Amino acid sequence: MKRYLAIYERAADGSWGAYVPDLPGCFTLGATREEAERYIREAIAAHVEVLRERGEPIPEPSSVAADLIEVAL
């Protein structure tokens, strides 16, 4: 089993986007963060399946952490 880092971003309208830096083109949108989390799991599985079907290599996870950085503005 592999573990990929998913990045979640909140949009101005309150919806959520999610993407996986190690799987270019793997992203999704959801009305809530919980929905985006569910959808990104599905998107990862589908993305990997397409790579397998095409005989392409499945990228190894390299992004292992994310952090919020506080700055004074």
Image (cartoon, rainbow, N blue to C red):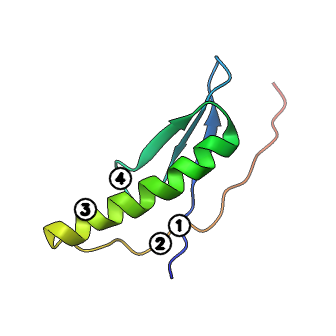
Q: CA distance from mark 1 to mark 2?
A: 5 Å
Q: Return the residue at label 3.
A: 50
Of callouts 4 and 1, the N-terminal one: 1
Front tag of 3 and 1: 3
Q: Are marks 2 and 3 in contact (CB under 8 Å)?
A: no
Q: Are marks 2 and 4 in contact (CB under 8 Å)?
A: no
Regarding residue 21, the answer to whether it shows in the image is no
User: Is the residue 13 above or below the residue 49 in the image?
Assistant: above
**Which disc number belongs to residue 61?**
2
Q: Return the residue at label 1.
A: 4
User: Is the residue 70 above or below the residue 15 in the image?
Assistant: below
Q: Amino acid at mark 1?
A: Tyr
Q: Amino acid at mark 4?
A: Pro
* In-image side of 71 versus 8 (left or right): right
Q: Residue at x 50, y 78 (%)?
A: 2
Q: Under tag 1, what secondary structure?
A: loop
Q: CA distance from mark 2 to mark 3?
A: 17 Å
Q: Return the residue at label 4.
A: 24
Q: CA distance from mark 4 to mark 1?
A: 12 Å
